[in-house]
Image (spheres, rainbow, N blue to C red):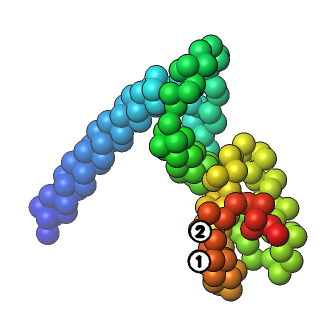
Amino acid sequence: MESRVEALEGGIEEVRSTLMDVQKAMKESHASLIAMMEKCLGKSVVIEDGSGSVVTKTAPMIQVSSEEVKETNSSSLLEDAMTEFRHSAKRVELPSFDEDDPAVRISRAEVYFRVQGTRPEVNVSLAQLCMEGPTIHFFNSIVREDEDLTWEGLKE
């Protein structure tokens, strides 16, 4: 019996050391991923420990000629909007749409959008994430009628 306990303790110690190695590797990978994101996006990304929140600081602006701006196509804008959507959804939780008064829901969501600095193209999708029950069913019926629904259109 004692040998079994010792074998289990040895196994547990091995698992602990492996777990510590994995944690160390994850921290290193996370740091390198953040560095790559900063390099690619031209932004400084700060992770606040414990809170799980991400703060993005924009690097100094670079002057771009009007010809270069014209070359920007709509697919890259759509990709930027989707990237912003994914990051905003993770950064801070949008208040749930559980109030009976639509004005309260809209007001809370607009405060969130203003604080997060989200673009209008993303607002409807972010709001949809926080809808439940009858609200989501109502929203889905509206979206079926107008697939290009904007936040302003939804508010009306």
Mark 2, other Cα within 10 Å: few <14 / some 14–19 / many ≥20: few
Q: Position of residue 82 (x, y in %)?
A: 52, 49
Left or right: residue 27 compared with residue 122 = left
Q: CA distance from mark 1 to mark 2?
A: 6 Å
- Residue at 63% x, 53% y is 122
Quadrant of the drawing holding the C terminus: bottom right
Q: Nearer the viewer, residue 122 or 36?
A: 122
The image quadrant that residue 128 belongs to is bottom right
Quadrant that contains the N terminus: bottom left
Name the disc covering residue 144, or none: 1
Q: Is residue 37 above or below residue 4?
A: above
| Residue 17 image offset from top left, x and y in percent | 27, 43
Q: Spot the residue most to the bottom.
A: 134
Q: Quadrant of residue 63?
A: top right
- Can you see residue 54? yes
Q: Quadrant of residue 147?
A: bottom right
Judge whether residue 136 can be spotted in this image. Answer: no
Amino acid type at mark 1? Arg
- Circles 1, 2 touching at the beta carbon (< 8 Å): yes
Image side of residue 26 versus residue 93, left or right: left
Residue 102 position, x and y percent, is: 83, 74
Residue position marked by numbered label 2 in the rendering: 147
Q: Residue at x 66, y 65 (%)?
A: 149
Task: Identify the residue at image location x=59%, y=54%.
Answer: 89
